[in-house]
Amino acid sequence: METKDYIVFLCYFVIVAGYGLYIYYKKKSASGDSKDYFLAEGSLTWWAIGASLIASNISAEQFIGMSGSGFKIGLAIATYEWMAAATLIVVAVFFLPVYLKNKIFTMPQFLNVRYNGTVSMIMAVFWLLLYIVVNLTSILFLGALAVSSISGLDFQLCMIGLAVFAIVITLGGMKVIGYTDVIQVFFLILGGLATTYLALNLVSDHFGGEGILQGFNIVHEKAADHFHMILKPDNPNYIDLPGLSVLIGGMWVINLSYWGCNQYITQRALGADLGTARNGLLFAAVLKLLMPIIVVLPGIAAFVLYNDDLFQQEMMASGELNPDRAYPVLLSLLPTGLKGLSFAALTAAVVASLAGKANSVATIFSLDIYQKIFDKNASERRLVNVGKITIIVSMILAIIIAPHLGIDKKGGFQYIQEYTGFVSPGIFAMFLLGFFWKKTTSNAALFATIGGFLMSIVLKFLPQFVDLSFLASTGFAVPVNGIYEIPFIDRVGFVFWFCVIGMYFISIYENKRGVVPNGLEVDTTMFKTKTGFAVGALLVLGITAALYTIFW
């Protein structure tokens, strides 16, 4: 990058940090209440909630990993984004009312209220490990890798810089995170669109076209096989996105678990009233529809240019083609000034995601572990201070672990999705039945937690010992290096139903023995929506359906 790029980036840093300090002092709570610090109770607007959701969700795994998957697989990877738009509507209508009606502030708290302290504590520890070892480290690793490759700075220095920037924002609490995320999303979208514009312009100029519209048409023509949302079994990438399963199978489990049962996502809405929270999720759903333009399309454009003998060396890593280099390569070609803007967008995505996850780690540890085990009479200020210490410690652990994380040849985004899929089926089954089936017992929830994880491991490694070629005709087994493997999205679906069926029989058995499960306040009136939200939701669902139809 040149001096002008660093000036643009410095302006971004000053704006975010300055606005964060302004929000901190303007909305600072004199009481130091823990719920105000962790949840920004009652102070986030719908647009702040929606922007914060997207800022926490979009990170290097999307900019780098999903763009790399666009290079390798094509538009089919956008199903994570467009399906998420529909999922957010479902969560807004059916999940949020249950949380807010029952005054739920953390996911372990929900498990404690609905099941018991054992289930809650197991999952609290489990979530902490997952957020730190998988989420924080992977975001830090991919983010530092991208920032380092673009800026030329040392990888370790980039990791420390990103972590420190995130800590500064996170220590201000959820109010600061929520409102600075609005600026982060602005830079994220503006910088992302600039990169997409450049990518399409490059394609247009290279093939003798004029403008980005011709660039898009050329990309569509040269990479027609990259514009199918539903892959066929003979597609080499079917193992990652198995056909109709992305519409009617495990993809729903992955998305509903992520958006509806995930502390660092739902936390943005848990401190607001129902109408504000629902509108925030609707706004996030609208932004989700735009994300493939920013994170997938540049990867497909890079694929077209690579196939025409451009970027041959730049796309290589350790002597092999590395799709995850597609986005950094495109950023390096941006003109002075725009490069700084796109660099700021990438940094904004990484920092916002790190801040969101670190805040959730602090929330769970302070409210669900420290207060219950170490100091039951801890003051509100003490809990806030413990949360701040937790944020710093978790970032230090992420810095230590991240260099040793390693990303396999699937690409960053697919890597993270697959290994998160070991736990999401059991978690979603436990929450879904806990919400809507009052007979579900605590032991059934334990079965979903432990049994679901173990079944995921069994199905992952089963192909090493059992020939699954007999499933090839169904599409539930795909040959990979001579072994028939189960696509991980299908595996997620199988494990989910395994958990649901197991929970059903365990609960029925215990009900007959006189076990009376804890209940929640749930009634049908909770799920009614206001006209404005209903119209917006129908538009989002209609656009999502149209996109799948067009790119079938």
Image: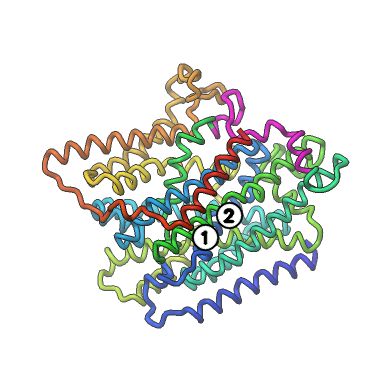
In this view, which residue lies farthest toward the right?
A: 208
Q: Is 376 above or below relative to 469?
A: below
Q: Is residue 400 visible?
A: no
The C terminus sits in image quarter: top right
- Name the quadrant containing residue 548: top right
Q: Residue at x 55, y 66 (%)?
A: 166
**In this orientation, which residue lies closer to the viewer: 376 or 197?**
197
Where is residue 23 shown, x and y percent of the image? Answer: 53, 76
**Residue under pointer 2:** 287
* Element marked by disc 2: helix
In this view, which residue lies farthest toward the front?
A: 531
Asked if disc 2 and disc 1 are in contact, CB closer than 8 Å, the reply is yes
Q: Amino acid at mark 1?
A: Gly
Which of the two discs, 2 and 1, labels the residue nearer the N terminus? 1
Q: Amino acid at mark 2?
A: Leu
Q: Residue at x 54, y 51 (%)?
A: 138
Where is residue 417 shown, x and y percent of the image? Answer: 51, 43
In this view, which residue lies farthest toward the bottom?
A: 30
Total marks in image: 2
Q: Is residue 440 visible?
A: yes
Q: Is 288 above or below relative to 456?
A: below
**In this orientation, which residue lies closer to the viewer: 331 or 542?**
542
**In this orientation, which residue lies closer to the viewer: 533 or 50?**
533
Where is residue 80 shown, x and y percent of the image? Answer: 54, 43
Q: Is 406 above or below relative to 461?
A: below
Q: What is the CA distance from the residue labelled 2 to the residue labelled 1?
A: 8 Å
The N terminus sits in image quarter: bottom right
**Residue under pointer 1:** 50
| Region rendered in magenta | 215-241
